[in-house]
Every structure is written in structure tokens, then in C-alpha cells.
Image (tube, rainbow, N blue to C red):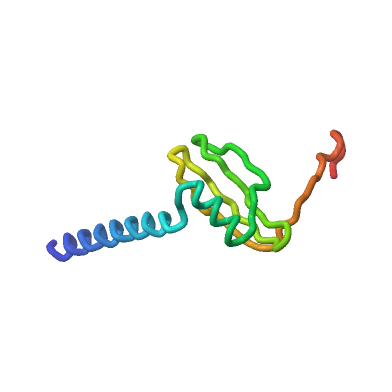
């Protein structure tokens, strides 16, 4: 019985430590919005290309550099913290139109 209790306590400790580690890792990719926007502009030459409103009033933005092709997607929460969601290369500006109604293409 004592072994089962020890295993349960050890498992709970590992879960708590893992949850704390995940929170700490997530904070590494978040900062006040002004600091994130300034860093994206200064270090990567990226400017905001598009934006949208997500759930819980979070603002999703796409920053990109047309010259270098780098891009970054951010989400800003209502508390003003902005988190990096994804980044990459080969950004292209597109202006696609919807196909005409009734077109099965």
C-alpha cells in the first residue's frame, strides 16, 4: 500500500513540475505588444500585414518582411501580452478572389 501511495505522490509531483515547465516555456515567447512589434521590425524588418479578432477578444496578427520573406504570427491577449505563435520563411502577398457562386472548382 505504501508503494502505491509513493508512486501516486511521485506521479503528482512530475505532473506539477511539467505544468510549471510548460508555463515557464510559454512565457519565454510572450512580452508586452510594443516590445514584440519593435523587435520584429528591428531584427527582422517585419511589419503588420494582416490581423483578425479571435476567441476571447484575442487579436491575431501576421507580421512579415516582403524583402526577406520572413513572417511571424502573433496573438495579443486582452491583458496586452503578445505571444509568438509561429514563424517562417517564403512569405508571399496574395490577393485572391473568391470563385463565382455555383463554380464547383
Residue sitting at the far bottom: 3
Vertical arrangement, residue 51 with respect to residue 93, above or below: above
Which residue is at a point 55% across and 40% down the rendered structure image? Answer: 59
Query: In the drawing, does residue 23 fall left or right of residue 72?
Result: left
Which residue is at a point 81% across and 39% down the rendered structure image? Answer: 98
Query: In the drawing, does residue 51 fall left or right of residue 2?
Result: right
Residue sitting at the far left: 2
Q: How many marks?
A: 0
Which residue is at a point 45% across and 52% down the rendered structure image? Answer: 30
The percent position of residue 89, horizontal first and vertical second, equals 67, 63
Query: In the drawing, does residue 2 fall left or right of residue 64?
Result: left
Residue closer to the observer: 76 or 22: 76
The answer to which image quadrant residue 81 occupies is: top left
Figure quadrant of the C terminus: top right
The percent position of residue 23, horizontal first and vertical second, equals 37, 54
The percent position of residue 36, horizontal first and vertical second, equals 52, 52
Figure quadrant of the N terminus: bottom left
Which residue is at a point 49% across and 35% down the rendered structure image? Answer: 56
The percent position of residue 49, horizontal first and vertical second, equals 68, 47
Residue closer to the observer: 104 or 14: 14
Amino acid at each position: 500500500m505504501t508503494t502505491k501511495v509513493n508512486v501516486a505522490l511521485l506521479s503528482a509531483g512530475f505532473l506539477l513540475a511539467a505544468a510549471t515547465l510548460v508555463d515557464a516555456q510559454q512565457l519565454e515567447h510572450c512580452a508586452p505588444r510594443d516590445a514584440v512589434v519593435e523587435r520584429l521590425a528591428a531584427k527582422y524588418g517585419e511589419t503588420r500585414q494582416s490581423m483578425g479578432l479571435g476567441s476571447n477578444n484575442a487579436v491575431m496578427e501576421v507580421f512579415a518582411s516582403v524583402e526577406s520573406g520572413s513572417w511571424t504570427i502573433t496573438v495579443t491577449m486582452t491583458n496586452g501580452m503578445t505571444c509568438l505563435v509561429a514563424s517562417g520563411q517564403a512569405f508571399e502577398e496574395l490577393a485572391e478572389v473568391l470563385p463565382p457562386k455555383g463554380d464547383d472548382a
